[in-house]
Amino acid sequence: MSADNGIYIAKFTDGYRVTHAQAIDNCFYGGDCSEEAKAFQYEYFKDSKVYIVREEAWGRARELSDEILTSEWPVLEYGVNEISFDHDFPTRPEAKAEDDE
């Protein structure tokens, strides 16, 4: 079974954010500017501090990596990666209305 996880440094036009995540490809679902992709981007990176300096984001990524690699389950299948988006960090997506019955 694949862990499908990694540490990801996301570069948005308004700064960098860092997270440990699985299935990061969700952030590109339908193109990185689709509403679905932006909803995943928000969910994956919403709790991250915003870093203006790239090296500070990489420092945080190394800290997270060390924490994971010294834990009970020391697996980082995809290591540490930087990904880029050509837009600001998405705002909280609106709740989608359920289909009327």
Image (tube, rainbow, N blue to C red):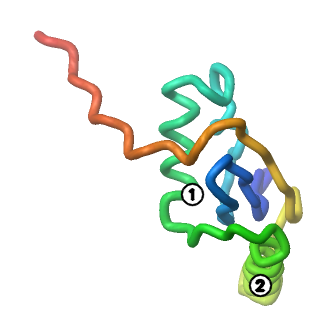
Give the CA distance from mark 2 to mark 1.
16 Å
Q: Earlier in the sequence, mark 2 or mark 1?
A: 1
Crowd tier of the residue under label 2, counting other residues whose Cα lies within 10 Å: few below 14, some 14–19, many 20 or above: few
- Determine the image quadrant of residue 100: top left
Crowd tier of the residue under label 1, counting other residues whose Cα lies within 10 Å: few below 14, some 14–19, many 20 or above: many
Q: Residue extending furthest left? A: 101
Counting from the top left corner in percent of width and height, residue 94 is at 30, 35
Q: Residue extending furthest top? A: 101
User: For this view, does 66 lie left or right of residue 72?
Assistant: right
Q: Which residue is drawn at 72% across and 85% down?
A: 72
Kind of element beneath mark 1: helix
Compared to residue 36, the image places residue 80 above or below, namely below
Residue nearer the viewer, 99 or 71: 99
Q: Residue at x 54, y 41 (%)?
A: 40
Counting from the top left corner in percent of width and height, residue 38 is at 54, 36
Q: Residue at x 81, y 67 (%)?
A: 54
* Residue ID for mark 2: 63
Compared to residue 22, the image places residue 75 above or below, namely below
User: For this view, does 46 lie left or right of residue 80?
Assistant: left
Kind of element beneath mark 2: helix
**The disc label shown at residue 21, or none:** none
Contact? badges 2 and 1 (CB < 8 Å):
no
Residue nearer the viewer, 86 or 36: 86
Compared to residue 59, the image places residue 43 above or below, namely above
Residue nearer the viewer, 38 or 70: 38
**The disc label shown at residue 45, or none:** 1
Counting from the top left corner in percent of width and height, residue 47 is at 49, 66
Tell me the amino acid under the disc marked 1: Phe
User: For this view, does 27 lie left or right of residue 76?
Assistant: left
Q: Residue at x 84, y 74 (%)?
A: 55
Residue nearer the viewer, 53 or 69: 53
